Amino acid sequence: MCTQHFLCSKHRTQLSNNLIKAVECFFVNMKTANALYQSGRYNEAFPHAGCAVETAKLILKVENIDTANALLYFTQAIILTAQIQEKRLQLSGAHQLIHQAILRLKHNIHVAPGTLSVCLEELYSTQIQLPGNPARHDTGISKHPHLHAVH
């Protein structure tokens, strides 16, 4: 499996060493990706969403942070990126991204259990709703459109 990188090594290092810059980068990229997604400019939205995902992963690695918010950031970025991939007809990439995110969160089962449960529910719901999923059906799990709305 090939992993796409959206951040150059210089920016990855800078963001790894500066939580404030990482959070700023996350929000800028999420807002940009969301605006482009909402206007139907999926190809332009994709790299911004990818940067948000990578930045959210870096934020999750930081010790002594607000883990609940870090989990929400990560989940927001994953869902938006998967939705963009769906619009770009990259269904296998969207499925793979969601699957990897679920596995990653399951390894953090001991942190912020309430938030973690919500995040996993949202990821499962998104995964089920993606076209091409053999298990796609109405699960009764609500989709929260606000999840990728950045405040």
Image (tube, rainbow, N blue to C red):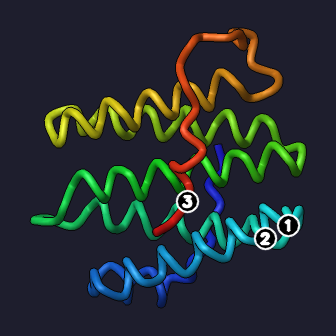
Mark 1 residue crowding within 10 angstroms, few (<14) / some (14–19) / many (20+): few
> Residue placed at 33% from the left, 50% from the top?
71
Q: Is residue 36 above or below residue 69?
A: below
The residue pinned by badge 1 equals 39
Marks 1 and 3 close (CB-CB < 8 Å): no
Residue 49 or 103: which is nearer the viewer?
49
Residue depicted at x 72% and y 46%? 83
Residues marked 2 and 3 touching at CB (< 8 Å): no
Picture coordinates of residue 137 (x, y %)? Answer: 71, 10
Identity of the amino acid at label 1? Ser
Taking the image as shown, residue 137 lies to the left or right of residue 144, namely right
Residue at screen point 41% across, 58% down: 73
Tell me the element at label 3: loop
Label 2 SS: helix
Q: In terms of sequence position, does the residue under pointer 1 or pointer 3 come before the other?
A: 1
Which residue is disc 3 drawn over? 149
Q: Amino acid at mark 3?
A: Ala
Residues at discs 1 and 2 in contact (Cβ within 8 Å): yes
Taking the view exactly as shown, the residue that stands out farthest to the left is: 64
How many neighbours does mark 3 have within 10 angstroms: few (below 14), some (14-19), or many (20 or more)?
some
Which of the two labelled residues, at mark 2 and mark 3, occupies the earlier sequence position?
A: 2
Disc 2 marks a residue whose amino acid type is Leu
- Please determine whether, in this image, residue 34 is positioned above or below residue 106: below
Mark pair 2, 3: CA separation: 13 Å
Per the model, the C-alpha gap separating discs 1 and 3 is 14 Å
Image quadrant occupied by the N terminus: top right
